[in-house]
Image (cartoon, coloured by chain):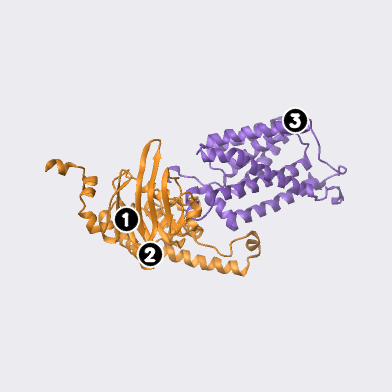
Chain colours: A orange, B purple
Amino acid sequence: MEVLRITNLSKTFDGVRAVDGLSFGVEEGAITALIGPNGSGKTVTFNLITGFYRPTGGEICFKDTNITRLAPHKIFNLGIGRTFQNIRLFPQMTVLENILLGLKYNSGESLLAAIFRTPSMLREEKENMQKAIALLKTVGMENKRDEMAENLSYGQRRLVEIARTLGTDSEFYLLDEPMSGIFPNMIPQLLSIIKQLRSSGKTVLFIEHNMKVVMDVSDRVVVLNHGKMIAAGTPAEIQANEAVLDAYMGKRRMRAS
Amino acid sequence: MSTFSSLPQPNSRFFFASALSAILGIAVDRLVYLPLRKNNAPGLVFLLASFGVFIFIQNLLQLIYGAQILTLRTGPVVEGHQIASAVITDIQILILAASLILLAALWLVIDKTKMGKAIRAVADDTVGASVSGINPEKVILYAFGIGSALAGMGGVLVSLETNIEPTMGMNAILKGIIASIIGGIGSIPGAVLGGFSLGIVENLGIWKIQAGWKDTIAFAVLIIFLLLRPEGIMGKKTDRDKL
């Protein structure tokens, strides 16, 4: 079953066709990689799906809901979480606060609850705190919990952003280059986090330039070039696809033959 | 010893003024700032627009009430309490107490409630807030409402002590900006500390020299801070290149 269906999607910026009649689907419970040369429209597609850009044309459906023109926070509330290529953390908050902000609060933190420290609020606060610390442990950042986010390195901020997104308990995760800037010994850990999402029934769509990672972890690969889908299939199929090789290597091989 | 009978009784006008201010603030946001946000206007445009709104409202007030000075004082003038060699009036005590209560309430809202957290998140990173399920427009609406209501209450408190006129806002804005720069922009304790420091320095200054130099003292303090400690007393040095 498809959890996401993109139909004839397009986005132009002052005449530049960043996404041009794009159609593809994302299988539920699978890991799908979105690849393509620089400027092929991958991040624009992410921004269209999550509501940060308004499409020029086309339609995006998440399960049975048309999300084409919804505001970002509404799309998030339907169960779509994401990370960004240029990490989005709250720099003036601590690492722990960043994670806590992504967690779902049930009883809420009303002014009255904050004044009277109601037992239900305290219990929830304690549960969320444990959950946040557990999330930080999964990305190996628990020793930085009280550090201000702005004082972290690029790779550390990316790990915190991933932990925050994991904490949102979404159904569908969009990860924009999750491995970039990550210290190499953390990559296997991140791969196992992504695989773990799949085994708990979540859907993952991720943008990645590291082909070894793409081939290792994904069930399906969608290839973009010039805002269009040029191929889709299993990693093995994509590796053998002529159009994909042309897009990445140029047409030189044809001229040589 | 005088009693507190000279004080204006807490009446509905105080709450009416703050509610009206909140509505006005939200209306200004919807009519002026929202269209600018939609067009991704840079910060300077917002600053200029806010001055435009300021001049517009100031002139509107002059049209309605005239440019003359008015007073809000009810009741007779009562001698203040002598503490050492300083004198403090009942009204000044009321202003101080009301300010402290409002300050505690604001701190509680910003630091402890979900809306306060959302306000800080949106101020830090609007996009990041959106992917945490926060509706930035709703948060901005609340922030304008809270801020404007506080400004309205502040206006009522000030007018208990001084005369009121349509152009009185400019001085409050300048002193407010100076106080927040001295204290450290974005920090509530910093704003309080900055306000008190500025007030004390100004008034100790005019103890020795003429009162007309009060504003000069305020700006001198501002310039000293901008040169030596631009992040303010409580502010942290921010490293803009890092993020």
**Label 3 packing within 10 angstroms: few (<14), some (14-19), many (20+):** few
Mark in front: 1 vs 2: 1
Disc 2: which residue: A197
- Badge 2 element: helix
State left or right for residue A99 relative to residue A201. Answer: right
The amino acid sitting under disc 2 is Leu
**Eyeballing the image, is A31 above or below B235?**
below
Which residue type does callout 3 highlight? Leu
The N terminus of chain A appears in which quarter of the rendering?
bottom left
Q: Which kind of residue does numbered mark 1 sit on? A: Ala
Whole-percent x and y of residue A257? Answer: 11, 43
Instruction: Tell me, yes or no, if residue B229 can be seen here.
Output: no
Sequence-first disc among 1 and 2: 1
| Residue at position x 50%, y 65% in the image | A129
Question: What percent of the width, then of the height, locates residue B234?
Answer: 56, 47
Q: Chain of mark 1?
A: A
Q: Which mark is residue B63?
A: 3
**What is the C-alpha distance between the residues marked 1 and 2?**
14 Å
Residue occupied by mark 1 = A33
